[in-house]
Amino acid sequence: MTQATATQSYTPTFTKLVSKEGGIEYPLEARYVCEETFSPLEVAYDYESIRRQVSREKIQAGPNSIWRYRAFLPVATDNVIDVGTGMTPLVKSNRLARRLGLKNLYIKNDAVNMPTLSFKDRVVSVALSRARELGFTTVSCASTGNLANSTAALAAYAGLDCCVFIPADLEAGKILGTLIYNPTVMAVKGNYDQVNRLCSEVGNTYDWGFVNINLRPYYSEGSKTLGFEVAEQLGWKLPDHIVAPLASGSLYTKIYKGFQEFIKVGLVEDKTVRFSGAQAEGCSPIAQAFKEGRDFVTPVKPNTIAKSIAIGNPADGVYAMNIAKKTGGYIESVNDAEIIAGMKLLAETEGIFTETAGGTTIAVLQKLVEAGKIDPEETTVVYITGNGLKTQEAVQGYIGEPLLIEPKLESFERALERSRTLERLEWQQVSV
Ligand SMILES: Cc1ncc(COP(=O)(O)O)c(C=O)c1O
């Protein structure tokens, strides 16, 4: 198979920033909030220009990364940061599907995304490509862990200075997975929402590109590629139902935008995809608002093992909730024990070790199936957005121990017999 490189040329298609409320227009600079309506800013495109420049064939001949969808992304030059991010596997589930009683379940596996094993590599590739175009030499972020990993790694690759802010109590794997790239790491004694507020203040004084603050309109567009890839990998068809995790709600709203854009330019047929979302009970402001039928999201103080999705005051919460409502989806939450069980279930049935966010998503998928809210025949895609090697402490103590033996055959055989007896006993207990 021949792969083109990232040098495929496109005339830029993004035209302005527009406020989500009131449609107030701004130039394409580093800003994220409307001064009149205080609503977030969104990148707008010339869809006629996109339609003229793309085709299924041209996309397929593009790089094996998110940049095959460059016509839909807010970068002006050909000089993008492409380390092979995206085009992660869409796996047709067999054993998990059977366990849940589903016939057409697919797993979008961003636990193996490049370079830092989460979907954040998508958004950061776009944000840093745009940051360079806007002339930033230092990049930064407020992170629940994965974003810091990705910003630090891709800044190292691009030769940009980097200073990231994280809550001090993150998992060891997330902190180490940032420090290795040698950025400045600020471990803040507080939760993510406090980190985010601090970063907004820092951003007022320092001329830095904060990927998820002043560059947020560009950054968040990277998540559309999770929608584009699924449509392409399903043979240029949209699924019937998706289940994705929610923290700020950005990823979820952008998968939706991605599907809508593919419909708009004629790459796929129009249809309503049901959008369901997953939160951890210990930080579930969007799920609570959804269940109570409110049209506003009340901030909460996070307390859950799913730290990567522990955002108590979600910037895109209301927009995410509205998508669930208008598409006939659900937003559900699960407790920490269910999250661990979800991580184990995915690992045991599909050989995918996901982090706590993925455990949350699988547990919510299971809950929705059990409640009859997912039709067994529907083509359902579950988004796994991060890797379990980074949150090992979550499952420590819940997955058994290796059998310690002498380097002798008889020692092995005794241990094997003991473990088989134990397995039989467990089975008997289960089947009583
Ligand atoms: C692994 C993982 N999944 C999902 C999310 C949710 O992202 P969003 O804030 O776009 O809702 C995050 C956020 O950091 C994450 O790290």
Image (spheres, grey):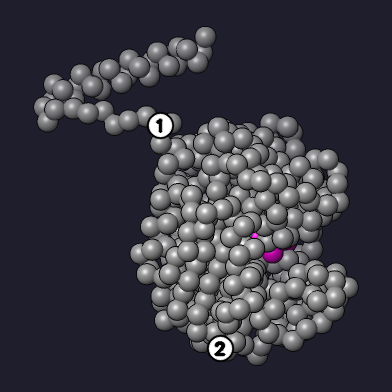
User: CA gap, disc 1 to disc 2?
Assistant: 48 Å
Q: Please tell me whether the stretch drawn in magenta is mainly helix, strand or loop.
A: helix
Q: Residue at x 56, y 45 (%)?
A: 306
Disc 2 residue crowd, few under 14, some 14–19, many 20+, Cα 10 Å: few
Residue 106: x percent and y percent? Answer: 59, 49
Can you identify the residue that label 2 sits on? 135
- In the picture of the structure, the residue carrying the numbered disc 1 is 397
Whether residue 253 is in magenta: the answer is yes
Which region is colored magenta? 251-256
Q: Nearer the viewer, residue 35 or 364?
A: 35
Q: Position of residue 368 (x, y in %)?
A: 70, 37
- Tell whether position 199 is magenta: no
Res. 349 in view: no
**Image quarter (top left, top right, bottom left or bottom right) of the N terminus:** bottom left
Determine crowd level at label 1: few under 14, some 14-19, many 20+ residues with C-alpha closer than 10 A. Answer: few
Amino acid marked by disc 1: Gly
Element type at mark 2: loop
Disc nearer the start of the sequence (1/2): 2
Residue at figure coordinates x 50%, y 80% from the top left: 138
**Which residue is located at x 41 percent, y 36 percent?**
396
Which of the 4 quarters of the picture holds residue 41? bottom right
What amino acid is labelled 2 in the image?
A: Gly
Q: The residue tagged with tag 1: helix, strand or loop?
A: loop
